Every structure is written in C-alpha cells, then in structure tokens.
Image: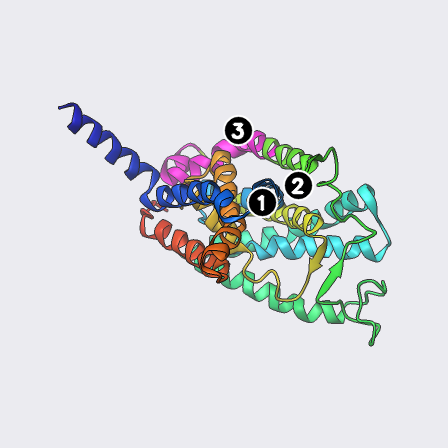
Amino acid sequence: MKFEALRGAVKHFVGNFGLPRLIIFFFVALLFCAAPFVGVNVPASLSDVCVRWTQNAVLVLAMVPMIQSGAGLNFGLPVGIISGLLGATLAMQIGAAGTGGFILAILICLPFAFFSGYLYGGILNKVKGEEMTIAMYIGFSIVTFMSILWIALPFTNPTMVWAYAGAGLRTTISLEGYWSHILNDFLCIRAGNFMFPTGALLFFVLCAVIMRIFMQSKTGTAMTAAGSNPDFARACGVSVDKMRRTSVVVSTLFGAVGILVYQQSFGFIQMYNAPLFMAFPAVAAVLLGGASVQKASLLNVIIGTFLFQSILTMTPSVINNIVKTDMSEVIRILISNGMIIYALTRKTKVAR
C-alpha cells in the first residue's frame, strides 16, 4: 500500500511538473556535476550562467501579464524590443552616456512602447483565439518595417552610422563609452574566475517588485480574473477587452526595458533582423519554469530563465569537451521549440 501511495504521489508530481521539465532539470544538474571531470572551469561557467540569467530575466518577465490576462504567450515581444532600440539609439544620438544615458534611454522608450503596445493590444482583441499566431506575424512585420527605417532615419552619431556612407545605422552598435555593463558592474562581486552581476540582479528585483505590485493591484486582479474566467469577470463589471489590452501594454513596456538590460550586459545594440526571433527564448524560458499558456508567476520566470540559460551556457562547455562537436545551437533550438510545442499541446480552451 505504501508503495502504491508513493507511486501515485510520484505520478502526480510528474504530471503537474511536466516530464519534459523534469528531464531538463536533471540534464542541467548532470551538466554541472560532469563539468569538473571534463576540464570545465566551473566558477567561470557559473559566472556566465548568472550573467545570462540577469541579462534575459526582464524579457522573460514581460511574458507574465499577457499570460495572466488570457492573451497567451507574447510572441510579439519584438514590438517592445523595437521600442527599446528606439530609446537606446535616440539617447546615443544626443550623446547621453553612463547611468544618466541608460535612464534616459528607458524614459525615451516608454512612450514608444506604450503607444505601440496599445495598437498591438487592439489588434489582438480582434483575433481572440488566434493571438499567438497573429502576435508572431506582428513581431515579424514590425522588425522588417523598422529595418527600412533604421536606414532612412536621420541619425548622425559617427559611432552609430555606417562610416562609408555617413548615414544608416550599423548592424551592430557598440555601447562602449555609453552604458556598457552599467548594471553588471554596479556592486559587482568578483572571486577569482567568478563574477556576479549584483546591479543587474537588483534591477531585475526592482522590475519583479513592480510587476508583483501591479499584478496584486485592482487592475492586476481584474486582469487575472479576465484571463481565468472571462464570463465571471464580465458579470463583475470588468471589461475583458480593456484588461487584455492593458496586459499587452504592460508586457510591451517590460519588453522595451528588458532589451535595454540585455544590451548593457551584451555590450552592443543589435539592429535590423536581430530581434526577429528573440521572443522564442523568452517564451521557452517561462514555460520551462512551469508556466502554462493560461498561468504564469514570478517563480516561473526566475526558475525558467536560470534553467534555460544554464543549458545554453553549460552545454557547449561540457558536451564539446566530450564529443568535440558544438551542439549548443542544436540543443537550444530543440529545447526552445520543444517546450513551446509541449505547452501548446496542454492548452485548454478558455471561454471568451
């Protein structure tokens, strides 16, 4: 009887946690355990994991509002990313640098994110049931459209434009001398080959606190109600369409700020088609953390981002030393798309 009870408990746990997530969790643990035996510098690898974790966490956090409101996974994250790129390039154009330049880039990008998120949310309200598909095409469209504008807009900063033409933004723009690693280096902890980006973590904590306060507010509660039970929400006087649009705006705002955090950690701004598929790692990370198409939490964001970035960091180091072949990109694509497919197959219908 005890064996049957234990078997039932294990089966229940695996069913709730998800077999793919469990496999990935043990795979990550195996990579960390195997690292010292194949000549991998564990402190340096762990440092890379921490840097990539804080670098991507705000972008993953942007997924939470839309999931909670019932609008699905935000495959249109490039809408927010483009707003962040606009804020960064405009701040660099006027010569803003350092902490002030980073803050100015955030302040500039927020109005763009609000306006584009409002339009984006209006479109999604007209295609209920197909939000994720339409969002993906919206993201692709705005990235392609902005690829034209990056050439046409009258930027003149010599560190940003093509040297031979004197016009049009470069494919990759260095943040050296502006706000490269401005968060990572703040209160940074160093011990040998290990480096922990304390400032970037504190910034993520600030964003997470803001998100939690918003989700626990009257608007956030109404948003969650609209996502979990739209009919009940309408009966209580909640405008489901308004809540969905609000969630898209909030998600777009966090996406814009998230790409600025990503940029300062990376040290470069990547333009043109670079944001095209940036939604997929963020979607995969939040799903890997235990979120579903209908429900997500801050814990899902933290765990999922750490696991996903651990795989991307440790796989090349460990697997390459064993088989002498770079499999990191193959595993990244497999896990990203596999987790998305897994989540969509478990999607349940929600009343509209």
Work out how far the residue at label 1 is from the one at label 3, CA to CA, in angstroms. 42 Å
Q: Which residues are magenta?
A: 210-236
Front disc: 3 or 2:
2
Q: Quadrant of residue 102?
A: top right
| Along the line of sight, the residue nearer the viewer: 127 or 279 | 279
Label 1 sits on what residue type?
Asn
**How many marks overall?**
3
Q: Magenta span: helix, strand or loop, mainly? A: helix
Mark 1 or mark 3: which comes first in sequence? Answer: 1
Q: Quadrant of residue 42?
A: top right
Looking at the image, do the residues carrying marks 3 and 2 touch, with CB atoms under 8 Å apart? no
Q: Is residue 273 left or right of residue 152?
A: left
Where residue 190 appears, as percent x and y from the top left, is 70, 35
Residue 269 position, x and y percent, is 71, 57
Type of residue at label 3? Gln
Left or right of residue 211: residue 264: right
Image depth: mark 1 or mark 3 in front: 1
Q: What x and y, as percent, mark residue 118?
A: 59, 51
Is 217 inside the magenta-drawn segment? yes
Toward the left, the furthest residue is 1
Residue identified by numbered label 2: 193
Q: Tell me whether circle 2 and circle 1 mark residues in contact (CB < 8 Å).
A: yes
